[in-house]
Amino acid sequence: MALFSPSSNSLFTTFLVLVLLSVVGGTLGLWLYVRTPYNTGEAEEVVQPVMFDHRHHVADDGIDCRYCHYTVDTSPFAGVPPTSVCMNCHAQIWSASVQLAPVRNAYFTDQPLVWRRVNAVPDFVFFNHSIHVSRGVGCVTCHGRVDHMPAVYKAQPLTMQWCLECHRNPIPYLRPQDHITDMSWNPSDQIAIGATIFKERKINPPTNCTGCHR
């Protein structure tokens, strides 16, 4: 008497196909998921300890990004402004505002505000802000139109694929230094301008692993 029925081969084959499809489908599903805004956190407003409206400070008051993030063109880190920078203005403007009480308290007690990080790359990724700024990559390229954001959110995925697309062809993203922080700069001859900057500054972004993983 046969141990297995004649249909066993078909059942076993079907089982193997289902397992294979599950493995391939699961892997593909995870590969796609990590690239979606659900995982990268794009367009999710981050609640901060103090309500800071970039629309007002950037668009209305015309404050340059580098006034607050003053290490962005000299350091690997853009940094967040200490409360002393905030108080340069707010010791005179809205100095009694209830909303700004945490700023005043942090300043007078010499305790920094704990801001929540919006844009970040993993610890195993080396990223230098000053290199990108000095080469002509504008703030809006990575951070989006912060002058339109009541609360700043992540505008780009900042995935390896996204970064490599720029490193392989940076010309569309390069701009003169006097437009680095200009949110609305949109020249009709961007490719020509970018190509000139690319050549003049001898830009050669790394695309090998050690360029970012050191």
Image (cartoon, helix red, strand yellow):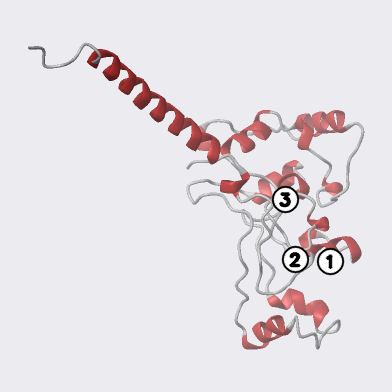
The residue under label 1 is 57
Residue 68 — which label?
2
- At a point 35% along the width and 26% down the height, the residue shown is 19
Of mark 2 and mark 1, the one earlier in the sequence is 1
Gap between marks 2 and 3 measured at Cα = 15 Å
Name which quarter of the figure residue 69 lies in: bottom right
* Placement of 185 over or under 97, stated as above or below: above
- At a point 77% along the width and 60% down the height, the residue shown is 66
Residue 191 — which label?
none
* Residue farthest toward the front in the current orientation of the protein: 1
Within 10 Å of the Cα at label 2, are there few (<14), some (14-19), or many (20+) other Cα atoms? some
Query: The N terminus appears in which quarter of the rendering?
Result: top left
Q: Secondary structure at mark 3?
A: helix
75 or 3: nearer the eye?
3
Is the C-beta separation of discs 2 and 1 under 8 Å? yes
Of mark 1 and mark 3, the one earlier in the sequence is 1
51 or 143: nearer the eye?
51
Q: In the image, 50: left or right of 76?
A: right
Q: Amino acid at mark 3?
A: His
Q: Secondary structure at mark 2?
A: helix
Gap between marks 2 and 1 measured at Cα = 10 Å
Of mark 2 and mark 3, the one earlier in the sequence is 2
The residue under label 3 is 143
| Residue 157 horizontal/vertical position (percent) | 63, 44
* Residue farthest toward the left in the current orientation of the protein: 1
